[in-house]
Amino acid sequence: MRNVYTTLLLIFAIAILICSYVISKKDKTELTKAISRIMIVAPLTMTAYAGALLAYDLMLAETIYAIYYTVSDVLLIYMLFYTLKYTRVYELRKWQKLALLLVVAADGVLMLLNVFAEGVFIFRCGLMDDGSGTMFYGIVDRGVLYNFHRMIIYGMVVLIIIPLAVKIKRSPSMYRKKFWLTLLSLIVIIAANVLYIITEITIDFSVLSYGVMAVAIYYFNVIYVPQGLVEGLLSSSIKNMDDSVMCFDIDGNCVYANSVAYAFFKTVDPAALTDYLNNWLGDRKLSEMQDTEWKESHGKGSFISHYAKQFKRLCDTNGQCVGCFFKFHDETEDVKKLEAERYRATHDRLTGIYNRDYFYEKVSETVQKNSECEYCMVCSDIRDFKLVNDIFGINKGDEILITIAGTMKKLSGEGTVYGRLSGDRFALFMPRKRFDKDVFINEIRGFSHLLGSSTYRLHIHVGVYDVVDNDIEPSVMCDRAYMAITTIKSSFTSMIAYYNDDIREATLEEQKITGEFGDALNKGQFCFYLQPQVSVKGKVLGGEALVRWIHPERGLIPPNEFIPVLERTGLICRLDLNTWELACCKLRQWKDDGYTDRHISVNISPRDFYFTDVYKTFTELVERYEISPRSLRLEITETAIMNDFKKQIVLIQRLREYGFCVEMDDFGSGYSSLNMLKDMSVDALKVDMEFLRKTENPERTCTILKMIVSLSKQLGMEVITEGVETKEHVDFLTEIGTDVFQGYYFAKPMPVSEFEKQYLGVLI
Ligand code: C2E
Ligand code: CA
Ligand code: CA
């Protein structure tokens, strides 16, 4: 009996050690480490017990028994650690682990001491019969402390059983089997052990259960996959899928469909799904079908749903068709997201109409579709839109843009494309015969009240390019329409301009001017001419500085050829600053030469007020050149004042208080000249005789002129008349009381040296 048992134990131990080697090679997770520890200690325990049974000497037997008891303690400790890690029911704290280890260590030490104390306090060995006549050393006597060892063993077994039991209760049924066997082998260990102690059986058969337990743990963790688990998981994943899945047998009967599929067909009857397959197949045979995928949409308008559908044959291992299945994937959300993304990429966020790139794309598409048609590109631009935003706020600005986009929609028709190109720029591409100028003018007039202000009107300019060649890039068509706008940009009355070749020339010229400007300024190609300003008594009081561009190739360029361009581009500020400085420099020279009673009038462009601090610039200039502000007269136009009336009143007041003489240039050419005078005073009004020359009713104009002069006298302002060309002018103007004259009658603008020669007596 003993021999059979020990052989069994040893074979079993070796088998377990081999498994332990395999598992330690396989992977090195915490769990496999815990398992391989058990699988090393379990065979050791078994080998120790087998050794004890085979011992031929009492002392040796007692020593091996002590080792066996100690190793079995260690095995249970490892079992406990493994169970806790594996079941995750509870976790031992550090001190708890330490306490357990200490108790086990104490047990081990006592066991060894017991050997030397001849088994007085734990156990004693003696020869026994295994029941079949073989003698061996077994436990004959158990001391008091043997119970301590047993308590440790049973206590740990209980600690192992609890988490296992909890885990079994909590786990889904298909996993329970795993834990049952471990639990069972533990119960067998206890039962066999108790039986061994309380009965006459001399050999502890429970030791074999250690091996069974180790093998069970190995098997269930490394090899075993619960039967039905894969199928169970597969079927539950199909059941829980968001896609409709229907399976059919070879005869076309629906054998399975998940709830989504039933909901899709609004039925609970598998027969309805069978009908679907038969309808879908029509005359075709299921066994001859190919796997296929396609897209389908159901519903209408905003209730439309999009599906990606799939048909697949199911074949056995021989490749024979055994059935088929359908999978419908609802991609409505994805399609909607994609559509929204595409919408965002192609439409303007604020107005919802096409953005620039998409507009160009659509124009090209339209032209391609109908290349015979004659088209026109209509582009719009709001005058001083930045100002609208500044004064009325961004919200008002946005509101205006949305209104314009709405009008675009209204004006569009078949074959028309419209979009927002940028900020305040819109474009409409339409068949030429559909473009009606009057309709556009009407709409633009309607916009002028959008600001809801009596002082400010919204001015929209429209440029039209009649497309002569449909192959021209849409962006170039827009550029040409905008070139047309530049010709009316500063006008308050013109609303629509057409592109023609002159405009192209002008634009090229404009580009040339702006391109050359910086370099020309640095090289000193700009100078000013002086046109004398003469008193009624004929005395030259000073002159107006009028800029000239001495171009190295083109000769002398008059200001009307470049000033409007520089004004549009904002470059005028740099030019004016240059002229002002040159004028101050000249005044300083005159002062040094003793001519302190002559003034120079300089022009200030409306743009200067936007981009420069006019007050600071002029005061710094006169201080730097140490000249009297009286000798520098400042010509400001009505437009400049009207742009920001309240601010300009304050500025003019400050300039005058500093000592500058401020003149209102081109008085009477604007809209609200008289209105302006009511709130603001300047030193002089400058009236252009152009006023008189252009009129068809000279008498009435003379009366108005008379009134202006008398009005300014009463308001304490000087009147300067420019454009004085004849003796009659001089006589009439003298009679009505004008103070100063300027005009060709006296002299044309002339180089400064000429002016000095003639009027200062300086000889060069
Ligand atoms: P403006 O300030 O009204 O200057 C008067 C313009 O009338 C000058 O033209 C002058 O040559 C012209 N003129 C003078 N007397 C007569 C006359 O008896 N009959 C006629 N038909 N015209 C006369 P110019 O020099 O060509 O200047 C044109 C405009 O260019 C100026 O008009 C002014 O608005 C602008 N400008 C000239 N220089 C400057 C400057 O330095 N800065 C700025 N911002 N603008 C300037
Ligand atoms: Ca002037
Ligand atoms: Ca003038």
Image (cartoon, rainbow, N blue to C red):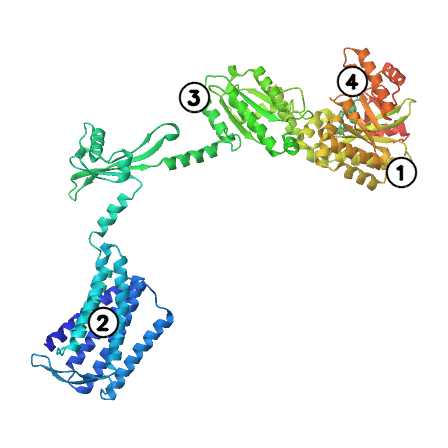
Which residue is denoted by mark 1 in the rendering?
592
Give the CA distance from mark 3 to mark 1: 76 Å
Residue at position x 87%, y 21% in the image = 738
Rounded to the nearest angstrom, the CA distance separating label 3 from label 4 is: 54 Å
Whether ligand 1 has any atom under 8 Å from the Cβ at mark 1 is answered as: no
Choose mark 2 or mark 3, whichever is in front.
Answer: 2
Residue matched to label 3: 369
In the rendering, which numbered label is found on residue 42?
A: 2
Q: Residue at x 22, y 74 (%)?
A: 44
* 1 vs 2, front mark: 2
Image location (x, y in percent) of residue 551 = 72, 29
Q: Of the residues under marks 3 and 4, which one precedes in the sequence?
A: 3
The residue drawn where x is 21% and y is 69% is 17
Earlier in the chain: of badge 4 and badge 1, it is 1
In the rendered structure, the answer to whether residue 370 lies left or right of residue 125 reads right
User: On the rendered image, what quadrant is the N terminus found in?
Assistant: bottom left
Q: Residues within 10 Å of mark 3 (few under 14, many from 20)?
A: few
Q: In terms of image quarters, where does ligand 2 lie?
A: top right
| Of callouts 1 and 2, the N-terminal one | 2
Residue 134 x/y as whole percent? 9, 81
* Residue at the extreme bottom of the image, as rendered: 117
**What's the residue type where badge 2 is placed?**
Ala
Q: Nearer the viewer, mark 4 or mark 1?
A: 4
- Where is residue 238 drawn, in percent x and y? 26, 44
- Residue type at mark 3? Lys
Q: From this view, report whether residue 584 is shown above or below residue 454.
A: below
Secondary structure under badge 1?
Answer: helix
Does the closest atom of ligand 1 sit within 8 Å of the Cβ of label 4? yes
Residue type for callout 4? Glu
Asked if residue 350 is positioned above or below residue 702 in the image, the reply reads below
Q: Are marks 4 and 2 in contact (CB under 8 Å)?
A: no
**In this view of the protein, which residue sits in the foreground, 503 or 122?**
122
